[in-house]
Image: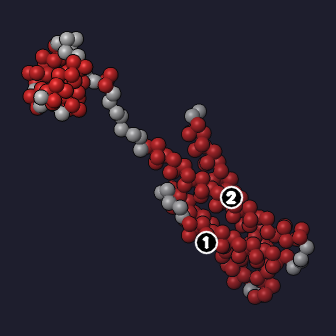
């Protein structure tokens, strides 16, 4: 398997695992936020929608960021909004704990922080791969070396570089130079043209 194909496979696997992680962390976050909001509003439906809002928003912005990354764009705004939604969700998760101990805060904060890091990193990797593929497709034009030229082409190149007269590149002269390539070498042509230019 080629390294590029392997990279695509691993990127696909990472995307699938991120989707699973988003569902798992979203459920944990929803339960915490629903309990927190319902305690204040005392309304089941409203509490459900509000508890889903921030996590759903973060997923939407993550998808928008991936769409921009697929075009090679930085997607800064979408990534910022994704992290912002996760940050607010994390704040509500911590607020719902009702405790001030470090362990309690960590339990409610880690799921949202993990999703934020994984989703933003995926967007970054996708963009990097798109830019790399685009750069690889812009292959430099093939430069023809002197050894790859035919005898006639080398003669014309030498004449052009030396500023020779136009008649040297006419078909008749080119044919003669090609047929007598061993006698009329490139070096002798250059010497002759140098003398012509001096005179």
Q: Position of residue 31 (x, y in %)?
A: 78, 72
Given residues 175 and 155, the one toward you in this image is: 155
Q: CA distance from mark 2 to mark 1?
A: 15 Å
Give left or right: position of 65 versus 16: left
Quadrant of the image occupied by residue 61: bottom right
Residue 190 visible: yes
Quarter occupied by the N terminus = top right
Which of pointers 2 and 1 lies earlier in the amino acid sequence?
1
Q: Position of residue 85 (x, y in %)?
A: 66, 73
Residue that numbered label 1 is attached to: 81
| Colouring scheme, one of rainbow, by chain, secondary structure, one colour | secondary structure
What kind of element bears circle 1?
A: helix
Q: Residue at x 89, y 77 (%)?
A: 99
Q: How many marks?
A: 2
Residue that numbered label 2 is attached to: 118
Residue 192's place in the image compared with 115, above or below, is above
For the residues bearing labels 2 and 1, Cβ distance under 8 angstroms: no
């Amino acid at each position: 398997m080629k390294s590029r194909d392997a990279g695509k496979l691993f990127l696909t696997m990472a995307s699938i695992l991120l989707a699973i992680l988003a569902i798992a962390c979203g459920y944990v976050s929803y339960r915490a936020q629903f309990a927190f909001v319902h305690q204040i509003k005392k309304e089941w439906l409203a509490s459900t929608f509000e508890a889903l809002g921030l996590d759903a928003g973060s997923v939407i912005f993550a998808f928008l960021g991936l769409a921009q990354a697929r075009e090679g764009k930085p997607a800064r705004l979408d990534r910022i909004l994704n992290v912002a939604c996760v940050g607010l969700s994390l704040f509500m998760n911590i607020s719902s704990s009702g405790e001030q101990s470090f362990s309690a805060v960590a339990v409610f904060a880690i799921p949202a922080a993990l999703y934020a890091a994984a989703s933003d990193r995926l967007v970054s990797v996708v963009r990097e791969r798109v830019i790399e593929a685009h750069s690889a497709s812009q292959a430099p034009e093939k430069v023809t070396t002197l050894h790859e030229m035919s005898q006639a082409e080398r003669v014309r190149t030498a004449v052009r570089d030396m500023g020779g007269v136009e008649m040297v590149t006419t078909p008749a002269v080119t044919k003669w130079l090609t047929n007598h390539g061993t006698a009329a070498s490139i070096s002798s042509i250059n010497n002759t043209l140098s003398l012509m230019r001096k005179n």
